[in-house]
Amino acid sequence: MRTPSLCALLAIAAGCGAVSAQEKPPASGPTPVFALPAPKRFALDNGLRVTLVPWGSVPKMRVELMVEAGSIDERAEQVWLSELTGRLLREGTATRTGAQVSEEAARMGGEVSVTAGADATEITGDALSEFAPEMVALVAELAQRPRFPESELGRLKADLLREFSVARTQPGQLALARFRESIYGDHPYGRVFPTDESLKALSLQQVRAFHEAGFGAARAHLYVAGRFDASAVEGAVRTSFGSWKRAAPAAPRRPAPMAARALHAVDRPGAVQSTIYMGLPVIDVSDPSYVPLLVTHTLLGGYFSSRITSNIREQKGYTYSPQAQLSRRRRDAYWAEQADVTTAVTGASLKEILFEIDRLRSEAPPPEELEAVKSYLSGTFVLQNSTRNGIIDQLELVDLNGLPESYLRDLVPRIQSVTPDEVKEMARAQIDPARMTIVVVGDLKAIDEQLMPYR
């Protein structure tokens, strides 16, 4: 058993200055280096782009097919059609049932999944290295020859209806939906929720039409990362995907988000907390100034030691887990701060968040504070890209947004080069309270007067 130190024993009885004083955090270590193995890139005659990345020592590999078909392709009455299509894709192929797909993936030491997003749908397979060509073929079959069993349509729609019912009771989801609608209007990015009627009306015919229009080689990029025989995988790609229809390339549908001061209050009678969601459109990742914005966002609210978190969580105790985000889509982004705060301090929380924004817009941060942020960002970037899926995620970001191949290699040095004055100027240029949309979900009887200064 470890014997307590004298200082610790004294601290229990009368307090010990060395224990109660805040200790200075250890100095940051050397800047980490991110080195992506040289990928092999090629394209098939039908337009499919392919990137192979040999990486790691564990005998595992990951296949990910990114198809540029997502919620951005939905009409107003088709919200969640891409999600329904993705779930039905996982229900089998022309030659295998959904259960057989799972059994086949398990035999290869892995699994397959389908994820529908705003700009793309991803079909992913993990497997032991020796099964890499077979997993490529399985992913290809899911994308090109889906079964779309009518017997599963009712069950999957019922699942979506239950999820929709739950989401409508969650203040964070309500705040997000109102915020997106406010800044994006009728653009697909602004449609978070369907209606009960539109969700029930989704049909197998619509699913098939969505797949026929959006799933094709010219709209797809295949990534393979991990340990694998490159020549065998390339052969499997050419065999499995070579006859896939080309389809029309994805048509750009960039939004024109609104940036204007507005307050939206959503009533939730009896709520003991208010959910705040406030932000505005900002430059996207393709802009040369995006990295300074990333640093500015992180310092302001993007990590645990950020200014807003320190203020309304650590100092004031208004909330437990506030967080800021740079929410990204294809050539689009917005900055937002989200916090669940006690009802009685709703107005005070807004005041403190805006205070921290204004402070950063008027005063450059101290060098030591900025250095801590840059070390955090550099370290987490390298750590996040130490996995197969992390590497593929970064490559997808680069390809979907038309970034140069040097972007990933240069990101850490660019982070390290950001200066205090750049942070101040970025806050002034991009994070302007006068152009923010503020959404508050809470008990209006209790918070209406608190919101008056922000109307």
Image (cartoon, rainbow, N blue to C red):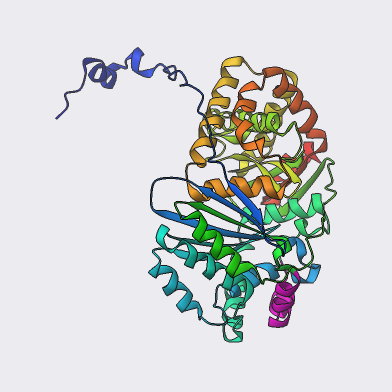
Asked if the stretch drawn in magenta spans residue 224, the answer is no
Left or right of 428, for residue 321: left
Residue at the image position 58 percent from the left and 26 percent from the top: 374
| Res. 114 in view | no
Provide the major secondary structure of the magenta segment: helix
Q: Position of residue 314 (x, y in %)?
A: 52, 30
Q: Nearer the viewer, residue 94 or 267?
A: 94
Q: Position of residue 18 (x, y in %)?
A: 34, 13
Find the magenta span and give its range: 194-213
Left or right of 390, for residue 24: left
Residue at the image position 21 percent from the left and 18 percent from the top: 5
| Res. 289 in view | yes
In the depicted structure, whether residue 70 falls above or below residue 303: below
For the C terminus, give its image quadrant. top right
Residue at the image position 44 percent from the left and 20 percent from the top: 25
In the depicted structure, whether residue 20 falls above or below residue 330: above
Instruction: Answer with the quarter of the image where residue 262 lies.
Output: top right
Q: Position of residue 37 (x, y in %)?
A: 53, 41
Residue placed furthest toward the top? 17
